[in-house]
Image (cartoon, rainbow, N blue to C red):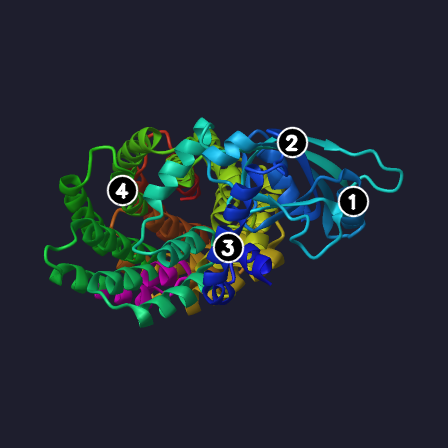
Amino acid sequence: MLNRGLRQMDVDIILKMGFFIRHLHQHITELHREQQNSKAAMPSKFEVFRGQGLSMEAFEKMKKTKGGLMSFNNFLSTSRNREISLKNFARPAAFDANTVGILFIMNIDTAICTASSTPFVNVKGVGFYDDKEEEILFSTHTIFRIDRIQCIEDKHTDRLWQVNLTLTGNQDDDFNKLTAHLRKEIAGNTGWSRLGQILIKLGEPAKAEHLYQLLLEKASSDGYKAHCNAELGTVYKDIGQYSKAITFYERAIDIYKKMNPPSQVNLAGSFNNIGLVYDNMGEYSKALSSYERSLEIRKVALPPNHPDLAASYGNIGLVYDNMGEYSKALASYERSLEIRKIALPPNHPDLASSYNNIGAVYYNMGEYSKALSSYERSLEIKNIALPPNHPSLASSYGNIGTVYINMGEYSKALSSHERALEIQKIALPPNHPDLASSYNNIGSVYDSMGEYSKALSSHERSLEIRKIALPPNHPDLAASYLNIGNVYTNMGEYSKALSSYERSLEIQKIALPPNHPNLAYSYNGIGAVYYNMGKYSKALSYYEKAQDIWKKSLPPNHPDIAQSKRNIDIVKEKM
């Protein structure tokens, strides 16, 4: 039960068995010391084996991280006996339809174990099983380097693999850099609080919420109460419960301000997080104000290349991006990336975020090859750094799919968006806004492929979710109405198309700045309807409004500007 709790990050089991976990680790440490100082000491270098099953997804992820680091987040049972590990554990897993059979071969250097405080114990005479297995039990924090992955020849299956690992520790530069950075990043007053932050980063918001609610109930100091409130705000932000998120962040700010002296770094963090929530709600002026307040505090309180400064520049860039001010957005994103390259390990998820954001700006500027390159670099890092069904992976697949739509590669686009939706259905609540985005994107692909009934069905599912999950005048609702209008236009149902475009424009006029490029798409759609209805003067008026906005908000070589000119020329020919 203990190892299951550790593998699955079961908060209740870990809380209940926390004392036992510590006691077992201490007991292994003591036995390790005794055995290594006795005649029963293991050789200075030796080999152990472990047979088990891995899901196909986990195995594919491991293959991509060949040469990288791997951790077993449980008390690790291994054997000196290769045949038992292979026949009793690895081979049976190969015949399970859901798993691949893996034989891990682990090279152990006892000097590394000692230097890195990685204790192990020979359980002969201690464990419950006979001596044939020759079990060696490691404590919970063993880290290995993946050396080689190769298929084991077997007459009955091709799903049996050997993975060679080498125990690593303080002698490994990558390990030291990653450990040092994680210790800085996973901050917290207690080990329990750090566990909550790890759960958030692993995309386990429900478990994190449960843990922080328990910790908040037991909190005695003001600082710890503020911390738990802030972390609960982050949990609610991540699952799309924005009003709850703001409530908890504001509670944290109230406590931080009253502390003597006020906690400047934590205040900055909470202002930044409120900005994130407003950004997700489409309230960009409020988001920008919160982000700038956070950056102002961080410039005073932190060193010049601190990762939190990079986060502030990145978030400010995101607001400018959403407001259609792309040159300002790109400058902010590039400043953020510049800091992160100095401050973070090369495969840190935040670097993936920077590349993703830069890709988004290039996409909005119509530079699709640059956008695709940035998005693919982002996904490459995420595949190494994140669990296989993390929501951020879905975001990358969705972004890549959207670029492919604009490049006319519809089969690639559909594949990417369906992969995004598949992950989101596993990782997110059923009415999360990100699922709506995937349905919206799939609808756009079907529209481009001429499969209008499928397109309409997907866009309507997207709109249905957005009506539940978002405020009534959120820009994403406008996007849904716009896309539904596009489908109706392509189906020749012009009155329905006009109604959808007008609803889109109505929301955009409330939610967006007057020269935001998205308004131009609504004007352009209305112009197209009037053109198809033979009302050329009205069509010309709306096409010109679209062109005027695009000229003000987009680079001069953007394809939408060229398209608007063609639309105007075609209408004038009809007049």
CA neighbours of label 1 inside 10 A, class few (<14), some (14 to 19), many (20+): some
Q: Which residue is mark 3?
A: 440
CA neighbours of label 4 inside 10 A, class few (<14), some (14 to 19), many (20+): many
Amino acid identity at mark 3: Asn
Which mark's residue is nearer the viewer, 1 or 2?
2
Residue 21 visible here: yes
Image height of 118 relative to 507, above or below: above
Q: Nearer the viewer, residue 368 or 241?
A: 241
Q: Nearer the viewer, residue 143 or 447?
A: 143
Q: Where's residue 367, x and y in %?
A: 42, 31
Amino acid identity at mark 4: Asp
Q: Which residue is mark 1?
A: 84
Q: Is residue 236 magenta?
A: yes
Task: Quarter of the image for the N terminus: give it.
Answer: bottom right
Disc sitting over residue 46 in the figure? 2
Q: Which residue is mark 4?
A: 308
Q: Could you tell me how far apart the alpha carbons at marks 2 and 4 are, in whole angstroms? A: 43 Å
Judged from this view, the residue extending furthest toward the bottom is 217
Q: Could you tell me how far apart the alpha carbons at marks 1 and 3 are, in whole angstroms? A: 51 Å
Amino acid identity at mark 1: Ile
Q: Which residues are magenta?
A: 232-251
Q: Could you tell me how far apart the alpha carbons at marks 4 and 1 are, in whole angstroms? A: 50 Å
Of mark 4 and mark 1, the one earlier in the sequence is 1
Of mark 2 and mark 3, the one earlier in the sequence is 2
Task: Quarter of the image for the C terminus: give it.
Answer: top left
Of mark 2 and mark 4, the one earlier in the sequence is 2
Task: Count the marks.
Answer: 4
Q: Could you tell me how far apart the alpha carbons at marks 4 and 3 are, in whole angstroms? A: 33 Å
Which mark's residue is nearer the viewer, 4 or 3?
4
